[in-house]
Image (tube, rainbow, N blue to C red):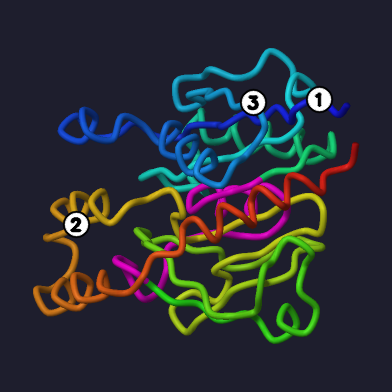
Amino acid sequence: MTAPLKLAILETDVLRPALKPSYHSYGRMFTTLLNSVDFSGNIEVFPVIDGKYPESIDDFDAYLITGSQHDAFADDDWIVRLRAYCKDVYEAEKPIIGICFGHQLLAHALGGAAGRADRGWGLGVMTYDFDDQARADLPAFVDQPEPVSLLISHRDQVLALPPGAETLLTNDFCRYAAYHIPGRVLCFQGHPEFTKDYQQALLGYREGDITAEQMQAVVGSLAVDHQGERIARWMRDFLDTRPQ
């Protein structure tokens, strides 16, 4: 019998104090999401923003890097350390999933680039199409080549993919909305772990960053279905195809 996969969640932010009682942490959000799609592995959360890491990279079979309000390309000591650590995880051939900040940080760490987006904040629900090449040759973990809608909250983006990466999802706002390095890396700019209630709560902190007209459009976008569980199934199936 194969031992259950051991997944380390590298938590890269702390929720705002007003949101903690209801939403706890990003680590818990991801644990809840993965449990909702019958992920059979064992999960442990490490708040790397506070310098807490696994004792050894080999203690875990796979890694997930959460979102964060911080810049993945910044020179803060903990971010520089995390980029180096993720490069070591990649070189150890451990599958890695990156979400939002994690999506950007992995691109930056592995030879691509991330930076501030020219078009400002992306908020609400956004819909992405499959890249033409991805549509023609779907990875094994993808269920179907239909557009994907996800909750988003970002003003940074991946600007260039790392070597070996292939675009999965794209739109006019975010060219590299999802990418993968076959068998090694799977990354999304959107937030499968978010709920619409949490997104609504976050919007209260963005009122000074966008116009009233933009906020109205963002709130209107929340009527579109959020497909976080669909992406969670991709994440689960991506991890299930890891080398044994």
Q: Eyeballing the image, is 81 above or below 203?
A: above
**Contact? badges 2 and 3 (CB < 8 Å):** no
Query: Secondary structure under badge 1?
Result: loop
35 horizontally vs 70: left or right: right
Say which of 179 and 143 sits in front. 143
Q: Identify the residue position indicated by label 3 in the image.
A: 42
Q: Nearer the viewer, mark 1 or mark 2?
A: 1
- Inspect the magenta stretch and tell me whether residue 137 lies in it: no
Q: Which mark is residue 3?
A: 1
User: Residue at horizontal 49%, vertical 63%?
Assistant: 157
Q: Amino acid at mark 3?
A: Asn
Residue 117 on the magenta segment: yes
The answer to whether any part of residue 244 appears in the image is yes
Q: CA distance from mark 2 to mark 3?
A: 33 Å
The residue under label 2 is 203
What range of the chain is rendered magenta? Answer: 97-125
Residue lying farthest to the top in this orientation: 55
Residue lying at 24% horizontally and 30% vertically, measured from the top left: 20
Q: Could you tell me which secondary element the residue under label 2 belongs to?
A: helix
Residue 171 sits above or below residue 112 on the image = below
Q: Does residue 174 appear left or right of residue 98 in this picture?
A: left
Image coordinates of residue 144 in percent, x first then y, are: 66, 75
Where residue 132 sits in the image (x, y, percent)?
A: 69, 86
